[in-house]
Amino acid sequence: MASDRLNSMWTRAVSAGRKGQPILDNVPFEFDTQASGILNWIKDRGANFVTSCTEEQQNAIAALLTKKMRDGHTVDELARMIRPCIGLTAGQAAANAKYYDNIVSSLRKEHPRMKAETIRQRARDAAQKYAERQHRERAFLIAQTESAFAYNRGADESIRQAQEQGYLGMMKKRWSTSGDDAVCTICSALEGTEIDMDSEFSFGGRVLFPGHRMLPPAHPRCACAVEYIEEEPPIKFIESPIMTGDKWIDNFIEDYDNSLIYTNGDESMSTRLLISHDEVKYEKDENMGVPFLYNSDRDVISYNPYAENANDYDMRFALTHENAHRVDCLSLHSWENENFRQAMDSTALLIMSNPEALEKLLQNDDYANDFAFNDLMSSLTRGKANDMLLVGHSEEYLESDYRRSLEVFADITCIDMGESAVRKELDGILKELYEAYKEVVAWKSLES
Ligand SMILES: [Zn+2]
Ligand SMILES: [Zn+2]
């Protein structure tokens, strides 16, 4: 079917429409030519096209069957005239019939003795050749007009997609003629007209499909285009953690946010965490070797769903841990607190002087499977107990007092904010450390 062949032409023209937009030259977005807007337009246009061809066909035949034509020609003659005109417009068919009649009358005048049948035969041959030329013209015109429809719709769709993805803000469209002498009066009247993206230009003629007047072409052979102008830059999304748009992390963020409201942990710290989490920025980094990392230089929490074991993580632990790093780095500076440092050293000594006690604790599944507890034991002992533990940092990493303090602080926060059985150790082996921790949390006012 004609519309099937036109489909690929429409699709190519749609892609060309995106490439023709200077405003998108430096925008790194991918144009989705399979977006439903464009696919629907091509589908509807195909259906409309067939209908309008059928209509034109009927009009063309009707033009050949007017009273004047019926009176002047035999049925056989009319049938033979109609055949080459199938596929032409009414105007073309009428022109073809007129051409036939002219040939007949001039042959009669110039060759009075020629047989009537011979005259009709010659006129038919000439009209047939003329019809072939008319067919080619019509095919060319259809291809040109349909490409222009699709090109302009592709351009419009790409602008809309770029807007949706936040690359472009509020746009308007301006009618732009090709600027050469061939511009007709319809289009020169439209030149420079500026309207909103969803408004229609005012030009006459039959509406061929919904939204026909939103874009060029205004008529067959119209070579006009639309220039897109950005009126206002895009609204930047508020960098709220709820808004990353990545479902993987968003689910965990929501769960973590809720957990902060109902925690039994230190009130001052949970407030700090809540405030911090409202302004934290999560950033996906698929090249990162670990699933989560707080980058204090750039103040972002990087995450990588594809990192090893990323999906085995206790997400509430991970998010609390990184958020605690952020609070510590930005305002508390646990590593500068003398009491906290001493408490870390004495707790580490307590653990290392009695490794059997730790081993015994780890026989309890609640302890063995607790990320915060394991990471805390690893950090306090500077990696010396890692063999026994589920997770931990390396000895080299923990050589630094600053890093050890960061990790211990974050892990105590996780235990305090959580509901795990380990929490009772805050009043047990972690008592001294927890007292020092609360001092760190309280030692700087909330405003600092
Ligand atoms: Zn035009
Ligand atoms: Zn950490």
Image: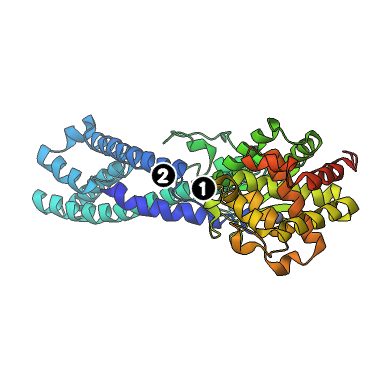
Q: Quadrant of ligand 2?
A: bottom right
Q: Is residue 346 left or right of residue 81?
A: right
Nearer the observer: mark 2 or 1; the answer is: 2
Q: Residues within 10 Å of mark 1 (few under 14, many from 20)?
A: many
- For the residue pair 98 and 201, the one nearer the viewer reads as 201
Give above or below for 316 relative to 114. above
**Does dot 1 land on a helix, a strand or a loop?**
helix
Residue 22 visible in rendering: no
Give the residue at mark 1.
152
Q: Residues within 10 Å of mark 2 (few under 14, many from 20)?
A: some
Alpha-carbon distance for marks 2 and 1? 14 Å
Amino acid carrying mark 2 in the image: Leu
- For the residue pair 342 and 293, the one nearer the viewer reads as 342
Q: Residue 397 location in percent, x, y?
A: 72, 66
The quadrant of the image that shows the C terminus is top right
Q: Residue 327 location in percent, x, y?
A: 79, 46
Q: Residue 380 location in percent, x, y?
A: 74, 57
Amino acid carrying mark 1 in the image: Asn
Q: Are marks 2 and 1 in contact (CB under 8 Å)?
A: no
Q: Is residue 59 left or right of residue 395?
A: left
Q: Looking at the rendered structure, which numbered label has been put on residue 39? A: 2
Residue 13 visible in rendering: yes
Of marks 2 and 1, which one's residue comes earlier in the chain?
2
Q: Residue 87 location in percent, x, y?
A: 26, 46
- For the residue pair 36 and 350, the one nearer the viewer reads as 350
Q: Is residue 39 left or right of residue 448?
A: left
